[in-house]
Amino acid sequence: MIINGRQVASTILSEIAQQVALLKSGRPKLAFLLVGEHPASQTYVRSKKKACAATGIESTLIALSSDISQEALLSQIALLNIDSKIDGILVQLPLPPHIDARAVMRAVDPAKDVDGFHPLNLGKLLLGEDDGFCPCTPQGIKTLLEKQNLPVNGKKVVIVGRSNIVGKPLAALLMQKKPHCNATVTIAHSHSEHLTDITLSADILIAAIGKPLFIKKEMVRPGAIVIDVGINRLNDQTIVGDVDFTPVSAIASHITPVPGGVGPMTIAMLLQNTYLSHIRRHPWH
């Protein structure tokens, strides 16, 4: 069965729109910081702004030159941190090589860090605390499994990829002693020995390694659930995931497509975090 991430995300965005319409404290507002003219980044920001408009969340785009100094970028973030009208701040990655992305992530007010990348929010995730923000893609994957009524409790989850954006926080999330979690999680990566043996053990296999068509049919146990996080552009401009979709879909019980799987869920979680930030900052909402 193909898991339709667009459909699930659309339902969530409709729910957010209904909640935003009932607010007495004004509309949530999300600020995008876009450094340079990276084509993929521009596309992603347009998609996120479109989703904001569809839910009634205000957004503002601050486009900055690729040669901006790190100091100037941090000053811009500081202004957004103290702006009472801004509920969420998203710094679109990647940043130019002369800018330290870690310093930039740390500069965002954790209470407005709707991407969930600040060390404080990642620490709260690891500790199982609920008053931070969870990174959007991991939260989107958990929500997608939940909305599809696919049990995670007690299941063997294998995540191929150990990035700070997906692999590590997703592992921390799915192992929590909480509803729709409680998984036994293994993280594998490019240096893992006997990788196929590891992936074949998975009830739920999550591919987030950033290599096109990396997960082959021989690496997937028949009946497993396969979640493809990858977005890769081939030489012919075709967009594919990290999973060799057609052969793997023939044996998986459930699988996410690329595009139309995890991507829309990531955007939905971003807007959900922005709404959550607003109501935390306006308890009388």
Image (cartoon, rainbow, N blue to C red):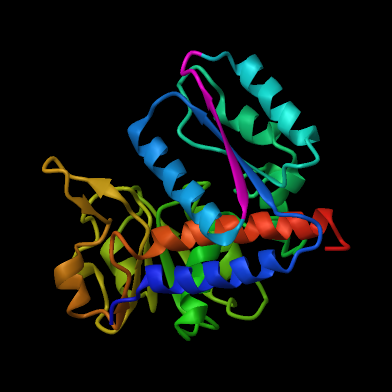
User: Is residue 278 found left or right of 155 in the rendered image?
Assistant: right
Image coordinates of residue 153 in percent, x first then y, are 55, 83
Above or below: residue 283 compared with residue 30: below
Above or below: residue 144 compared with residue 106: below
Q: Quadrant of the N terminus?
A: bottom left
The number of discs equals 0
Residue at 17% x, 79% y is 250
| Nearest to the observer: residue 169 or residue 83 | 83
Q: Is residue 63 covered in magenta? A: yes
Most extreme residue toward the right is 284
Secondary structure, magenta segment, majority class: strand
Residue at 43% x, 49% y is 47
Image coordinates of residue 4 in percent, x first then y, are 35, 73
Image coordinates of residue 166 in percent, x first then y, are 48, 53
Regarding residue 285, the answer to whether it shows in the image is yes
Residue at 51% x, 64% y is 140
Q: Quadrant of the C terminus?
A: bottom right
Above or below: residue 195 compared with residue 220: above
Q: Is residue 62 covered in magenta? A: yes
Image coordinates of residue 111 in percent, x first then y, are 76, 47
Most extreme residue toward the left is 236
User: Is residue 236 found left or right of 67 in the rendered image?
Assistant: left
Corner quadrant of residue 21: bottom right
Corner quadrant of residue 68: top right
Q: What range of the chain is rendered magenta?
A: 57-67
Corner quadrant of residue 38: top left
Regarding residue 169, the answer to whether it shows in the image is no
User: Is residue 269 found left or right of 202 in the rendered image?
Assistant: right
Residue at 67% x, 76% y is 177
